[in-house]
Each structure stands twice: as structure tokens, then as C-alpha cells.
Image: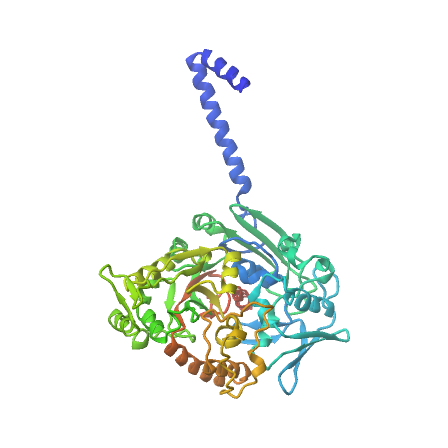
Amino acid sequence: MRTFSKLATIFSRLPTREKLFVVVLSVVFLTSLTQYFVLRDRLNVKDSDDYFIEGMVGNIHYLNPIFADYNDADRDVDELIFSGLIRYDPIAKNFFPDLAESIDRSSDDKKITITLRPNITWHDGTPLTVDDVLYTYRDIIQSPGFKNPVLRSAFDGVQIEASGTSKIIFTLPRPNSYFISELTVGILPKHILGDTSVSDFEKSPFNKNPIGTGPYKVVQTKLASSGDSISLKEYENYYGEHPTIQNLKIVTFANESGLIAEIDALDSISKIHPDSDIAKKAEESQKFNVSSYHLNQFTALYLNSDNQFLGDKKIRKAISLSINKNELTNSTQNRIDTILFENKANDERFMYDTTKADTLFSEAGYNKNDQGNRYSSKGERVILPLVSLDKVGTELPTLIAAQLAQEGIEVPIRIVSEEEFTNLVNSREYSLLLMRQGLGYNRDVYPLFHSSQAQDLSQQDNASTDNASGTDQTQDTNTNNGTPGLNFANFRSFRTDGLTEAIRKADVPQDKDKLLAELSEILADENAVIFISTPQYLYAINKSIAPFPVSALDFHSDRFTVLTNLARQQAK
């Protein structure tokens, strides 16, 4: 402070012209200093002439396949760096061996034997072994401390063991034709991560500089507040068909304006929202072909059937009739009404009809008072707390709460972080749960609607105890390490149990589709879940490459398989 006072005194004694000179010089200095820090933090995109550069809005958190479910940008890069035992081809829409050389099933469909390809190496030259596979699935994913409950539940009750130096045997507690899709998760290197505890995985430096067995290896990682840049190079010893694009750079931007500023340096832009400024710029540009696609993902409102109010089927129906889905969707989403992603806006079961809703509420004994608030015959106000993940945003929960408020129902909204969300879901501390989720490659609905995946099954009437569906009663034991499964509605029915089990056993796609249609009818009748929308996106690709030919993807990351094929076709 004393030094500053002396400088101020000196400045005050200077002639006017010299004061002006000092002020101008200070402004120039501060401006230059600011530009230095801005440019130092800015992504250096335009110096990458030898790279195919794809840009997106977002951030990269973990370059680790076991956490890929949390962030699309992470999954994008993981898809290129890591390999699973099985790979999914979004063009053929089928599964094929990847690290696996062969796949054998037992006659009862409970045992899957994988034989590894020979001579596979990690990007650091270390050979891949069965120990890496056991480490990934058994030591990490099946660990009680593993923090990805969706992935952990997929391997619940599965026995995993090695046979010799090249075979891994998965023994399932029951037949599950979808299980093969779980083996697409990338394998991790035990020789690098073996001494890292599961609880410390999120903090591991490996997540920023990973080593995989996939078609690309990491050359450089730059993480900045303005965005991230991951430079990838074709792995020369990759065991599979080599990609045509040898050098690939994935660049993320913190916001739309950041991407637009660098749009001329990009060769492709992914995950574009149709109503965004990026979409407008890309469509106006002479550089890009722009195509649309939707994901195998959906947003849904789950009604907790254990709630005294929502346990009444008539009330759930009234809630459904009170939701105006057309007001909840926009140009970035497609309305859906069923688990099959069907838009049935003209089906009276899914129409917005407050008159019918009010009738059902009244028949169930819940009427509005003079202030328009709905009460039970005992004078209890109808209050249904809604929980939603912060990534969903506040607009959709607010709209839903406003629509139900018009029917006299108070809906307190609770927007929470991932950790708090997981705790609330596990304890089922909600009446309404707003979820944005994907079915993944397997489209397995068992975790969502089977009674064994509901809360506290041992204390409830077991819907399958009657064995009306003729299924094995041992399947109804919830073994998710003391926590409930993914039946967020806590809905229990021997009809849904029988169908979800049958869907898992069915091998013929047409049979699965027929069973899913039957399940969809039951869900429409019971209204334990209200399906709202599926997201719509645009993908811009340099016109030197053929237009994107696929209109539906399971994950955004699947676009890279398609993009490689497009590049290969162009090369011809």
C-alpha cells in the first residue's frame, strides 16, 4: 500500500501531457496482457492441417470407458482409444467380435465363452492378456465401490473366470440374450491401473493420458477453460482394419460462440442442436453437408408407485392426461409415447385431456378447493416432489410442475448433482423422477420394469411369487449389493415380469419386437412411466466426404464407425 501511495503522489505531480501518456501506456499494457492470457488459453485449431478435426460443444472429463456413461464427449474419444470384447456396427446394426476371436454359447444360454485374438498389444507395446479382461469386469465393474451403478447392475450375479491363457467364461444367473452387448465396454490395462483402488479411479492421471488397444492412440491432450483438444494418431499395431483417417483431432468448445469462431478450421461438427446458431452457420456454409439423426435415448417421467397417492392406477392415469407433451417438446426433440419410441399423439390414451383428468381425480376422492388446490377427502393436500438431475436443466421440470399445478397438484422441484441424484434414486426419495436415459445397444427393459429391480422387494408382495408367468422364482431376488435396481417407478406386475424375462430370452428380433409391443400396451394401461421425447441432432461433415447416411444412432460415438466408412468410400 505504501508503494502504491508513492506512485499515486508521483503521478499527481506530473504535467497533464505526461499524465495522459502514462494512462495510454497503461491501457496498452493491460490490453496486451489480457490478449496474451486469452490467446494462451485458446485452442490452437488452425495449425492442424494434417488432422481431420471434429468439433463439438462440451468438455472432456474422463478418458476412461468405465465412466463413459456420464459424458458424451468422453464416450466419443473412448470409442477410438479403447476396444471391447465385442463391437457394435451401427450400419449393420449388429454385434461382431472385436478383441474376441470367437464367441460360444452353451445350450442353456447361461454360459458365454470368449476366446481372445492372439498378439494384441496395448498402445505402449505390452501384450493384452486375460488378466486385463478379468481385471476390468471382475475387479472393477463388479466391485461394490464402483461408482457406475448402471454398468455394475449389468454384471450383477455374473460369474467371470479365465480358462487357460486365452478364454474367459461368463456364467449368467439366467439366460439373457442382451448380455452380449455389455461386452462392448472398453478393456482397461491391469499393468498400469492394477495398483489403483476403485475408489481412486476418478482421480487417476490415466483418465487424462490413457493407454488402450483401439484404432487410435493419444498423441497429445490439452485441457483448457475454453475447451479441450485430443490429438489422436492411428495405432500402427492395431489388430483390426486400420482407419482411413490416420490423424484425428477431437476439439471441444465451452460454448457455441467458441465453436463458431473456429468453424472454418473444422472438418465435421457433431451433436448440433437443430435450433442453434451452429446449425444455422453450418447450413449456410458451402463447406458442409448437414444430416439429421436421433438417438436411442429418451426423457421420461417415472411415477413412484410406492407413493400412497400414485399407487392408485386411476390417479396415475389422471397425471398422464394432465401432461401436455406438445408443450414439453421443441424442434430439438421428437415426441414419443411408448418404449418403442412411437409418436401416438392421436391415440386418446396419450392425449392431453384435463376434463377426463379432473373426472378421474374426483372419482378417486381428490377434489379442488376454492383456491384450485387438490385435497383428499381427509383434507390432505396433494404434494408430489419431483427430482431431476442438473444436466436435464430447469426448463422441463418447471413446465411439468406448472402443468400439474393447473390440476391443483403442488410439485416442489429438486434439481440435484449426480452424487445426490444417485443417493435419492437408491433410496427412492421422490414421488416423481424425471430421467434422461438411453437403453444402449441392448434395449434391455428388464432393469426398468421387472419387480426384482424395485425397492425393498423382500418386504413387498412378490409379483412373481404366484409364478403366473411360469418363470423361475429365483429371478426375483434383488442382488444389487443392497440397493434397488433401475425400476424407478417401483412398479410390480407379474405381467411385466413375464414379458421382460421373455424378451431377454428371445433370440429372434421379430419375437423381441412382438413382446416389446405387448409390454408397451401394458405400460400404456398402467401409466407408471410417462414417455416424453427423444433428442434430435444434426451432423455436419465436409462435402469432400459423402453425406452421413444413418438416421438413428444408439450413441453419438457410433458416428465414428460411420465416418470411417465414409472416408474409406471417398478414398475409393
Q: Vertical placement of 117 versus 544: above or below? A: below
Q: Nearer the viewer, residue 152 or 337?
A: 152
Q: Vertical placement of 41 versus 357: above or below? A: above
Q: In the rendered view, does 168 fall on the left or right side of 26?
A: right
Q: Is residue 177 visible?
A: no
- Residue 326 occupies quadrant: bottom left
State the scheme by which the image is colored.
Answer: rainbow
Q: Is residue 24 visible?
A: yes
Location of the C terminus by quadrant is bottom right
Residue found farthest to the front: 378
Q: In the rendered view, does 153 fall on the left or right side of 515?
A: right
Q: How many marks?
A: 0
Where residue 258 appears, as percent x and y from the top left, is: 46, 48
Residue found farthest to the left: 370
- Residue 17 occupies quadrant: top left
Q: Nearer the viewer, residue 533 or 83?
A: 533
Where residue 233 appears, as percent x and y from the top left, is: 63, 57
Q: Residue drawn 59% across and 76% down? A: 179
Q: Residue drawn 29% across and 77% down? A: 348
Where residue 420 appears, as percent x and y from the top left, is: 51, 57
Q: Vertical placement of 376 versus 114: above or below? A: above
Q: Nearer the viewer, residue 75 or 478?
A: 478
Q: Residue drawn 54% across and 75% down? A: 458
Q: Residue drawn 53% across and 37% down? A: 37
Where residue 431 appears, as percent x and y from the top left, is: 41, 65
